Image (cartoon, rainbow, N blue to C red):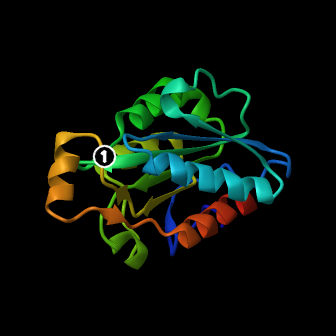
Amino acid sequence: MTGTDNETATGTHTETHAGTHAETATVLVTYGTTNGSTAEIATAVADVLRTRGLTAEVLPARSVTDVARYDAVVVGGGLYAGRWHKDARRFVRRHRALLKERPVWFFDSGPLDASASERDIPPVRGVRRAMDRLGVEEHVTFGGRLADGAKGWVAGMILRSGKGGDFRDFGAIEKWAQGVADALK
């Protein structure tokens, strides 16, 4: 993945910063989540980066105080009512100056159906704006998970209607993460 194509099978590309880092690059994989699904995706991404020879740290977006020591950043956010999780949005806003100086990838987690496995889902408006401002390498949307016991009134309504479940495709997540690793070599 060069980051120069407009569309690929795995997501939407914009301007590129990747390809200039050594195999030992340190990558921050950070996320905003309410019920843990996006954290599990972030962990899967970091696991792939590590198997490809990179150093990867996984941290909740709300706990990251500085990104200066990272060569690249992957930011994930759960989608809630058409918006990225507030912790992911705040992370990007807080660290935007340093994020502009390094390769950044975005992922969303959210559709509670198979749509993310069937087609490329474009970023929601707020994520698209952040991508344009930062020159994000790539964006992808993965299916989400909503399991019994999920927090929130809306989550409870969705579960009671029988529309919960796990729609994450870890094969697709791993393939996308391999592309991130390849871009950093």
Q: In the orientation shown, which residue stands out farthest toward the top?
A: 65
Residue 90's x, y, as percent? 41, 29
Residue 103 seen anywhere in this rendered image of the structure = yes
Q: Is residue 96 left or right of residue 22?
A: left
Q: Residue at x 66, y 65 (%)?
A: 179
Q: In the orientation shown, which residue stands out farthest toward the bottom?
A: 118
Q: Which residue is mark 1?
A: 150
Q: Residue at x 54, y 67 (%)?
A: 170
Of residue 40 and residue 74, the one placed in the foreground of this image is 40
Q: Residue at x 80, y 48 (%)?
A: 21
Q: Which amino acid is tagged 1?
A: Ala
Of residue 149 and residue 137, the one placed in the foreground of this image is 149
Q: Residue at x 51, y 32 (%)?
A: 61
Q: Quadrant of residue 146?
A: bottom left
Residue 5's x, y, as percent? 56, 68
Q: Where, quadrant-wise, is the C terminus in this rendering?
A: bottom right
